[in-house]
Amino acid sequence: MDIALIIAGIVLLIAGIAGSFLPVIPGPPLSYLALLLLHFTSFKAFSTDFLIIMAVVVVILTVLDYMVPAWGATKFGGTKYGAWGSTIGLIIGIVAMGPFGIVIGPFLGAYLGETIAGSDSKRAFKAALGSFLGFVAGTVMKLIYGIVAVVYFIMAIV
């Protein structure tokens, strides 16, 4: 049974890392689930405090992942149109352009949203840049969590 749980955990860790970049995959929750599976093997029992802290971090990251790109657009002078455009652009970008759309979608969406709202091109570009930087920040946060989960997983089975 331990081997099956470890294999499932490895698959979840890989999916968790992929989810750092692909918004349709919940990266941090999958990475956490991998640690939880490992907890129930004979290799390593993580402390309750550790599991609770890691779960709280997952919840915080999940909430921030949706808020940071919109906040970035707003912080750089954008409006709610830019924030909504960023979110819609991300979804359309993934569908229309695949992995490249993850990067360009939020940027174009924020730009178009601001343009629709009547912003001049300079202000729209600035809001789009803020949205893009927010997306990058969210990706980095999720990737760091995924790497931490991989490190703890490997340390526990070695």
Image: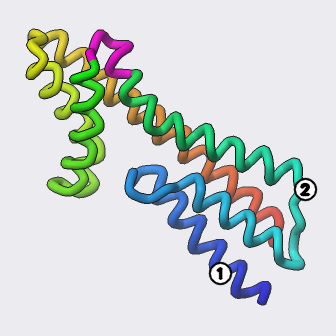
> Does 79 sit left or right of 133 as displayed?
left
Mark 1 and mark 2: Cα distance apart in space = 22 Å
Give coordinates of residue 49: x percent, y percent: 88, 48
In the picture, the disc for residue 47 is: 2
Whether 25 is drawn above or below 59: the answer is below
Q: Is residue 31 above or below residue 5?
A: above
Residue at 28% in and 54% down: 99
Magenta stretch: residue 26 in it? Answer: no
Secondary structure beneath dot 2 equals loop
Q: Tell me, for residue 84, which label it has, or none.
A: none
Q: Nearer the viewer, mark 1 or mark 2?
A: 2
Left or right side of 53 for 131: left
Give the quadrant of residue 7: bottom right
Asked if residue 72 shows in the view, the reply is yes
Q: Which quadrant of the figure contains the C terminus?
A: bottom right
Other residues around mark 2 within 10 Å, as few (<14) / some (14–19) / many (≥20) = few
**Can you give x and y, in whole percent of width and height, for residue 42 in the image?**
89, 78
Quarter of the image with the N terminus is: bottom right
Residue stretch in magenta? 72-79
Q: Is 17 in front, or is 37?
A: 37
Task: Name the residue carrying label 1.
Answer: 7
Q: Secondary structure at mark 1?
A: helix
**Amino acid at pointer 1:** Ile
Three-letter code for the amino acid on which mark 2 is drawn: Ser
Residues packed near mark 1 inside 10 Å, few (<14), some (14 to 19) or many (20 plus): some
Colour convention of the picture = rainbow
